[in-house]
Amino acid sequence: MFSSPYPDVEVPNLGIYDYLFGALAEEDLDRVAVVDGTTGAETTYRALRGQIDALAGAVAAQGLGVNGVAAILCPNVPAFAAVFHGLLRAGATVTTVNSLYTADEIAIQLTDAGAGWLFTVSALLPAAREAAQRTGIPAARLVVLDGADGHPSLGDLLALSAPAPRVSFDPATHVAVLPYSSGTTGRPKGVMLSHRNLIANVEQARGLLGVGPEDRLLALLPFFHIYGLTVLLNLALRQRARLVTMPRFDLPEFLRIIQEHRCSYLFIAPPVAVALSKHPLVAEYDLGSVHTTLSGAAPLDGELGARLAERLGCRVLQGYGMTEMSPVSHLIPHDSRDVPVSSVGHTVPNMQCRLVDPATGEDIPVPAEGTSAPGHLLCRGPNVMLGYLNRPQETADTLDADGFLRTGDIATVRADGVVTIVDRLKELIKYNGYQIAPAELEALLLTHPGIADSAVIGTLDADGQEVPKAFVVRQPGADGDALDVAGVMDFVAAKVAPFKKIRRVEFIEAVPKSASGKILRRMLKPAEQAPVPAAASEKQ
């Protein structure tokens, strides 16, 4: 077992409202809390707390409280903060819904979570209304934040001026948030995260991240995802920093917001790192205010991280976690000097980890020097979920008897405790008895000047042998236009061991990714993967 080199932190026994807003200092009340990056509209901490209290009073007056569940289907706008924390202030459980979901997907989550309220915006109302009708949520409880006929708006609820309720619950066991995750496998499941889970993770991460009151954080990563919810929304509010919201990614708008609002700290996923390090448009903007960029949600290649640091002239950090851990378990500290960006840094305080041999189940020891053998990463700490909602078997499959969470990721650990994620346990490609990590090949492909993006999966050849196949997005311009199948294969073959060579290539328009930036490899696999004849795109 290994743990953090940093001392444990105290986790207050509070609800998250009291943790974030209960001790707001007088000098912080008129500090800007949230800025709409699109319009420039500002909300102070004083105003935000007032909105949260009013929203809590409004829903409590209509019966929503400790035993209720409300859903939020909303992009990153300032109102998200008021609604999310207002619902928690009332004692409700909040399930956050992916803004890209169809009506069918929304309805499935609403039903599974038992949601009786749905908060959304007019742009998403058609799908929201259909899902609400199918799950029995009445029009009066489908709140359209920016207003729509037949539904209450956020302004309507705030105008009720109902007093915030007095609520009582155990922060360690009361479910605050119910995000949905596929875990290590399977269909999305409701992840039960308590108030204590959320508070613990902010306390575990904030000292390592170095976010301060003068920082301006660009909130691109969606708040409906636990990465954006904890590391952006909650941590920024705890540190009294300024959040600049952005509802969706558009590179020119992203660069404009950084320049205009003098954003200092960027939280991104690797696809944005690729754009920032490669796209010529970046050179047309003044990004000198950025001192730190943190990448998470998917593996960031060390070479890509170094290029990004050089181009922006900033620190580049990497973190690791999963929804089931609220989500952060590992971070490169902001003041580190000897931690490679290709790693995910150290275990955060209050956590213990183990590496287990996937084949034998035996623990892999931390070496006295050098790097350990790879193993399945298991984590335990106060940020680990209570379990999956109404899924006792899946919970037992994920949490062992000692409270360790099976992450489904393969990792190594150095003698000094620095952890590197090798790949997903279930996504390793087995070729002639060798294990091949798709993430390693994807990172290598991104170093080619003619490749804008890539994904690698295992496919079956004519003999039923799993071989690596690359899906490649060409970089616009001369380098990309000239790139062909042979060029991709030869580029990889020159840089890897023979068993790691790419055996198939397919050019595509875009790599499918989740909202948080993870490659959705399952969408690249055929519905029924049977052996197929060797294609023209193969090399032996």
Image (spheres, helix red, strand yellow):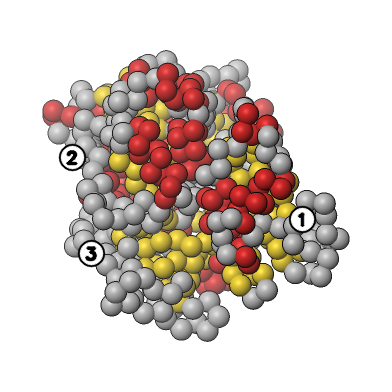
Task: Tell whether 321 sits left or right of 527.
Answer: left
Disc 2 marks a residue whose amino acid type is Ala
User: Which tag is nearer the camera, tag 2 or tag 3?
Assistant: 3
Relative image position of residue 516 (x, y in whole percent): 51, 43
Q: How crowded is mark 3: few (under 14 residues within 10 Å), some or many (20 or more)?
A: few
Residue at position x 64%, y 60% in the image: 501
Q: Position of residue 58 (x, y in %)?
A: 41, 31
**Residue on which the image places disc 1:** 538
Q: Name the residue under label 3.
A: 5
User: Are there few (<14), some (14-19), or many (20+) residues within 10 Å of tag 2?
Assistant: few
* Residue at the spot 61% in from the left edge and 33% down from the top edge: 479
Identified at 37% across, 63% down, the residue is 419
Q: Which of marks 2 and 1 is nearer the N terminus?
A: 2
Q: What element carries label 3?
A: loop
Label 1 SS: loop
Residue 45 placement, left or right of 304: left
Q: Can residue 444 be seen in this view?
A: yes
Q: Does the rendering let one see residue 101?
A: no
Vertical comparison of 424 with 470: above or below: below
**Helix or strand or loop: what does disc 2 sit on?**
loop
The label number, if any, that marks residue 23 in the structure image: 2
Q: Which of 439 and 329 is in front in this view?
A: 439
